[in-house]
Image (cartoon, rainbow, N blue to C red):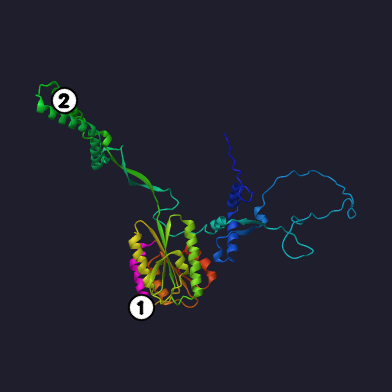
Amino acid sequence: MFHLIDRRLNGKNKSAVNRERFLKRFKGQIKEAVARAVKDRSITDIERGEKVSIPVKDINEPTFGHAQGGVWERVFPGNKEYIKGDEFDRPQSGGGGGGSGGAGDGGEGQDDFVFELTREEFLNFFFDDLELPNLIKTQLQQTTTFKPMRAGYTSDGTPTNIHVLRSLRGALGRRIALSATPMEDLNAAQEKLDELLETCDEHDPQVIALMAEIREHKGRLAHIPWIDPFDLRYSNRVRVPNPTTQAVMFCVMDVSGSMDEMKKDIAKRFFILLYLFLERAYEKIEVVFVRHHTQAFEVNEDEFFHARDTGGTVVSSALKLVKKIILERYPSNDWNIYVAQASDGDNWDSDSPTCRELLANDILPLLQYYAYVEITEGEPQNLWYEYERVAAQYRHFTMRRIREAGEIWPVFRDLFKKAGLGERSAA
């Protein structure tokens, strides 16, 4: 039996295997430290690592040592304070360690154990309890399935897969190639025979020899088969990977005039976080960016966050565009479809009922999940009240309000927390 020990070193000259074991063992304490760290962090800094500390008491391990048993006496040189028989208290543990706080004449303690999480480790712990909800059609973690696909033709196969046209085309090409030389020889002999017959009779030895040669050439041509096993071609099908899950996420953002810079900044931060989460958690997922004012446009990521156009507010234009894109490119039978919408809720009064009808009748039946985030400091806007009627009808439609940037984290985690960690309800 052989034991293989992985002693490869990472960039910090520490054992990568031991580091993974440490992170797994103290996962709970590290997640708490990460949660404390993100409270004071800007969302734009989410991708950097973090220094976290763990109390020393949490990483202490039991040890075994040899004690000096029995009754024993020791005499220390230079003793001026104690004589034989004096008793004194045992020093408390940690008395010689460091600690935090100002200078003083008492107190004891130990420094916390501090280490640095890499960017990848930090994001793994932060997104550990998040997922796209209601992903019930298939699981991304499952092994990839395969589907047959046409891949040309092959010379081997079963009779049921014979491609007749391709086989006859190959047979015709073979017969033309093999009969070229015998046909030239036959034509040449036939011309020479015709010339001889003009001056000689049929019993002439030369005529008899040419006629024998012509019969030989015709025999060679007759022996060329019309179709040969070599000519057979079979339809070839190969197994290609077929993703077990196809998911698409629509990011819809209001960029109308009522969305001031503060609201746009909150919306942008929310979608930055969402996009980072999706990109990190799911390898096989597409993201569609839709921005709208009175008109809606499908844009790329850069335009979604940085374009400067603005105008009035007609939210239904975005919903109509989302519906159009779904019907044209993402059939609900094959795709898990998600929509996240950020707006200040300010919409034309006559347009909000249209939005409710579009969601209830046309869009939500096609979706797995719809998350609506309303960014407003005061009371909810008219769109909020229409959406409440939709939320009462569909459980996979959720809505939240964000009043300030500090609420982005809890709202995001609440919208995308794993099933079983609490019910989602409108707030």
Secondary structure predominantly adopted by residues drawn in magenta: helix
Q: Is 18 left, or right, of 68 in this rendering?
A: left
**Mark 1 lies on residue:** 350
Q: Is residue 22 above or below residue 166?
A: below
Residue 417 seen? no
Q: What is the magenta range?
A: 350-367
Q: How many marks?
A: 2
Helix, strand or loop at mark 2: helix
Query: Could you tell me which residue is drawn at 59 percent across and 51 percent down?
Result: 25
Viewer-side residue, 160 vs 398: 160
Viewer-side residue, 77 vs 66: 77
**Mark 2 lies on residue:** 210
Which amino acid is tagged 2? Leu
Asked whether residue 224 is drawn in magenta, I would say no
Residue 389 point in image, percent of width and height: 38, 72
Residue furthest out toward the left? 201
Asked whether residue 364 is drawn in magenta, I would say yes
Q: Residues within 10 Å of mark 2 (few under 14, many from 20)?
A: some
Residue 364 point in image, percent of width and height: 36, 65
Helix, strand or loop at mark 1: loop
Q: Is residue 292 above or below residue 188?
A: below
Which amino acid is tagged 1? Ser
Q: Residues within 10 Å of mark 1 (few under 14, many from 20)?
A: few
Q: Is residue 324 above or below residue 85?
A: below
State which quarter of the image contains the N terminus: top right
Residue 198 point in image, percent of width and height: 10, 28
**Residues at marks 2 and 1, CA–CA distance in whole angstroms:** 100 Å
Q: Is 6 left, or right, of 389 in this rendering?
A: right
